[in-house]
Image (cartoon, rainbow, N blue to C red):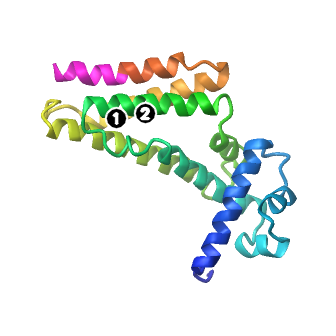
Amino acid sequence: MRKELTAKGKATRNRIIEGAAAVLREKDVSIATLDDVMARTRTSKSQLFHYFPTGKDELLLAVAHHEADQVLADQQPYLGCLDSWEAWQRWRDVVVERYEEQGEECPLGSLVLHLGRSTPGARDVVVALMRQWQESLATGIRALQTAGHLPADLDVEHRAAALLAGIQGGVAILQSTGRAEHLRAALDQGIGDLRRAAA
């Protein structure tokens, strides 16, 4: 069992993770090395293995968690406050902007694909991300219900799941084609369906 890290230790570990994430945004995960990470973060091999004893895969898994957290963080504060139609529109614009800026590369997707199903915890990163994202959307829909903008009998989980599925499909097409039209359409349709339910 590993000892609890001190505040300084946590800061160093986070610095290594953030540096590794920056390296992996510049280099393909299959060719990036621990030497690249050490150079970027100015850490020694002994330091790196102190925080990631099993090596590269453990570090990559930590970076995957970091990238998953970033997906949700990039949507704040809007994702956490979807209590009006105006807030939903602002969130929609932020999502489109984020993925247009990211373009055809997906740091999290590349990491999970590289780690594969054989790496303990790799799939769990994506499962947890999708669960948290859907829960945030469901919370936003319930906020509209509380404000009287949506009927109380609306199937909240179904609507949140459909909206998230639309986003993921739009992002996948954007990564394949470089075009964001499908992502915009999925978001506009999902939010539009909510508005029509209100009517």
Q: Badge 1: few (under 14), some or many (20 or more) residues near its Cα, within 10 Å?
A: many
| Magenta-colored segment: predominant secondary structure | helix
Task: State which quarter of the image contains the C terminus.
Answer: top left
Q: Residue at x 52, y 24 (%)?
A: 170
- Left or right: where 22 falls relative to 128: right
Residue 164 image label: 2
**Residue 62 inside the magenta-drawn segment:** no
Q: Could you tell me the amino acid type at mark 1?
A: Ala
Q: Which residue is mark 1?
A: 160
Is 3 on the left or on the right of 190, as rendered?
right
Give the structural element (helix, strand or loop) at label 1.
helix
- Residue 75: x, y in percent? 45, 41
- Residue 196 part of the magenta segment: yes
Q: Is residue 92 above or below residue 28?
A: above
The span from disc 2 to disc 1 (Cα, nearest Å) is 6 Å
User: Looking at the picture, which amino acid does disc 2 mark?
Assistant: Leu
Image x and y of residue 74, in percent = 50, 43
Labels 2 and 1 touching (C-beta < 8 A): yes
Determine the image quadrant of residue 195.
Answer: top left
Residue 61: tell me if it is visible. Answer: no
Q: Quadrant of the N terminus?
A: bottom right
Q: Nearer the viewer, residue 98 or 153?
A: 98
Q: Foreground: 87 or 69?
A: 87
* Secondary structure of residue under mark 2: helix
Across the whole image, how many numbered discs are drawn on residues? 2
The boundaries of the magenta stretch are 190-199
Toward the viewer: 92 or 105?
A: 92
What residue is shown at x 41% (from left), y 29% (from top)? 92
Residue 39, position as x, y percentages in the image? 84, 60
